Amino acid sequence: MKECREQNFDATAFIPSFLETFDRAKGNSNFYGMKQLPQMLEIGEIANEFIELMFPGRCGRDRMGLSLQEILLDQMNMVCSDLKTQIFLALRYEKPEEDEEELKQKSEHIIKSLCALLPQIRIKLKLDARAGFDGDPAARTVREVILSYPCIKTLAIHRIAHELFRMNVPLIPRMLNEFAHKETGIDIHPGAEIGQSFFIDHGTGVVIGETAVIGNNVKIYQGVTLGALSFPKDACGALIRGARRHPTIEDNVTIYSNATILGDITIGKNAVIGSNVWIKESVPENTMAAIQEPKLTFRDLNGKKH
């Protein structure tokens, strides 16, 4: 692109005032030059390759003649090598003062720790896929759920991102989940804790905040928000980051479409939350919360009464 670009404009006169907007030019920023940063394009490819690792064959890649062990080894080596590079770049950005060799060793340790967790992550994803099949009468097979349902793509990425978030990896967890958000319309912060057998039916518009906790066998529908009612601040008025501010959803809860549940409250076991409700207080277990049935009126457009 650089070779074919025709330079017919000289921006020299405009650079000084534009440069003034950059704090690092004034020595007020920890940004340390133009070293490479993690790239969303790379993160997206890594996310897709992790899904392929969790469910070999999902991408349709031809690997005839290879054993399952060979396929898994090749896939894990490839995706973890790529992720290790991106983690190193993120760590170097976060801690530019640290020795690069130490950061490389830390990246290696993070990848090994993640690999040790992959078996339990895959087991959770298999349970998620089964929950999708059991919870949707339109699903023909579990394989169909794995191949095509947006919730499985989102959860595969989230469960990896969540573990990296717990390891205090900068940038990468949020980038992974924002890639999933773009792909599926489901927005889950990597800090959210999600139990097993979780199913998001349809999924578009679902928002799950950083400190949300979701138990086992929970099912939610499109448009559900598990959000914050308010944002706690310190004595100086700055936001207190990481404080509990999102709901806890206990086991076996069903939340129907467009429900909004806000704040550090608890939805008890086996509760059912109806569509379009706005909830700001805890709901006891074995309880249904729903708005009253609206009254429908009918008017004949030709002037006749009903």
Image (cartoon, rainbow, N blue to C red):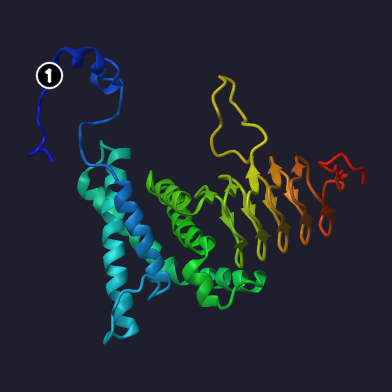
Q: Nearer the viewer, residue 5 or 27?
A: 5
Give how far across and how far down residue 221 sits, in percent: 65, 56
SS state under label 1 = loop
Q: Residues within 10 Å of mark 1 (few under 14, many from 20)?
A: few
Q: Residue furthest right?
A: 305
- Residue pointed to by mark 1: 10
Give how far across and how far down residue 99 sits, in percent: 22, 43
**Where 240 sits versus 256, above or below?**
above
On the rendered structure, is 144 left or right of 28?
A: right
Give how far across and how far down residue 294 sits, in percent: 85, 45
- Residue at 49 percent across and 50 percent down: it is 190
- Residue at 83 percent across and 55 percent down: it is 288
On the rendered structure, is 271 left or right of 103?
A: right
**Where 126 sits versus 232, above or below?**
below
Q: Nearer the viewer, residue 296 or 299?
A: 299
Which quadrant is the N terminus positioned in? top left
* Numbered marks: total: 1
Image quadrant in which you'd find residue 53: bottom left
- Residue at 38 percent across and 58 percent down: it is 47
On the rendered structure, is 175 left or right of 273?
A: left
Give how far across and how far down residue 301 sits, in percent: 81, 41
Q: Residue furthest left?
A: 3
Q: Amino acid at mark 1?
A: Asp
Q: Nearer the viewer, residue 113 or 42?
A: 42
Image quadrant in which you'd find residue 11: top left
**Where 208 sits versus 20, above or below?**
below
**Where 272 sits versus 246, above or below?**
below
